Amino acid sequence: MAGIIKKRILGMDVIRALSIIAVISLHVSATVLYRCRPYSSTYNTSFIVNQLSRFCVPAFIVISGMGLTVNYREGESYSEFIMKRFFRVVPQYIVWCVLYILIITRNFNIVEDINDIIYGNVFYHFYYVPLIIEFYIIFPFIYRFMGKRWWLLLSFAVTIFLLVDTYYFGNISSKYWFWDKKNLLYWIFYFSLGGYMGKNIDKISSKLNRHAFSIFLFFLISVFIIIYGFVSGNQFNKNVDYATTFQRPAVLLYSTAFIFFVFSFRFKKGFVMKIVRYISDMSYDIYLVQSGILYLYTEYYIGRYVHADSLNFEVSAFLVTVFGSIILNKLKKVL
């Protein structure tokens, strides 16, 4: 999402554009899930949409690892590398945090606000920024390993262990950093996968192109697996957060399959790709603002129609959030 891309890989633009749309779809469907009657037709539809959007954050992290690896200059000093990325990501993050505090959360305790900004707790989607900064901090130290298969397998082992322990043994807690989703170890496989693909992009793309049908079947299987728990009623009798969390093995399988599926295509420049690149370039800006627009629209909708638990709300909220985010960011650049 946030990054400095010099070498343009069209597949990265496609994934980034699809991922930011999926983020909005994820948040809109979650808004409906928390409000509608469990297992109603609206609930079932929203749940499936929510699950099929779960590739978004893992995909963003894969693309971040890939972009950093492709464009990293080995002679660049650590301080130069960090400052370049901090100035790209942090200033507008702080501005939007302040705006969310002033307009939405209205928590005017300065000490708490500063702490929330540092840890990404001002609003529910801001956790991503401290998380990606963690990866920026460690990247120069692990760059030499990023193209190695043993590093990819090691990162997979670490991530899958945590996901299995979290999902099947119930160790989900935001009170402790190790079990919180801001712990980069939950995401280290995605980042390492991006680095591995970045260092071997031509070879991997060629292999995925040759085996496109097999990749498609793998993707279909992963789609079935990610919604199987819901369809079969096998939810371990847990709540919506538990049933839909990123912190489960099925999301890792589905997200990986999605990445491979996208890269199995050969993309060409053209009108559609111009739109894709436009959304891709704006993805970080959209990410920061979209939850605020969704929140304000939901409050407006409830004030007018009482309930925000219908498919009509879901569709309208999605469209308002997508186009509202784009328009607001366009106005921001003009002003």
Image (cartoon, rainbow, N blue to C red):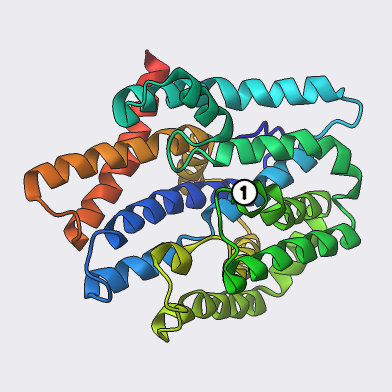
Q: Residue at x 81, y 20 (%)?
A: 79
Point out residue 173 in the picture as x, y percentages from the top left corner: 56, 55
Q: Residue furthest bottom?
A: 232
Q: Picture coordinates of residue 86 (x, y %)?
A: 66, 24
**Which amino acid type is shown beneath numbered disc 1?**
Tyr
Q: In which quarter of the image is residue 155?
A: bottom right
Q: Nearer the viewer, residue 256 or 323?
A: 256
The 10 Å Cα crowd at callout 1, few under 14, some 14 to 19, many 20 or more, is few
Q: For the image shown, how many numbered marks are present on the structure?
A: 1
Decide if residue 1 is in sight here. Answer: no
128 or 178: nearer the viewer:
178
Q: From the viewer's perspective, is 48 left or right of 314?
A: right
Q: Position of residue 144 (x, y in %)?
A: 91, 44
Position of 171 compared to 307: left or right? right
Residue bearing mark 1: 176
User: Which of the image's four quarters has the C terminus?
Assistant: top left
Q: Quick check: 299 left or right of 188?
A: left
Quarter of the rendering containing residue 240: bottom left
Q: Is mark 1 on a helix, strand or loop?
A: loop
Residue at x-position 57% and y-position 76%: 222
What residue do we see at 46% from left, 76% from top?
A: 227
140 w.r.t. 19: above or below: above
Q: Would you place residue 211 above or below residue 78 in this image? A: below
Snapshot quadrant of residue 220: bottom right
Image quarter in which the N terminus is found: top right
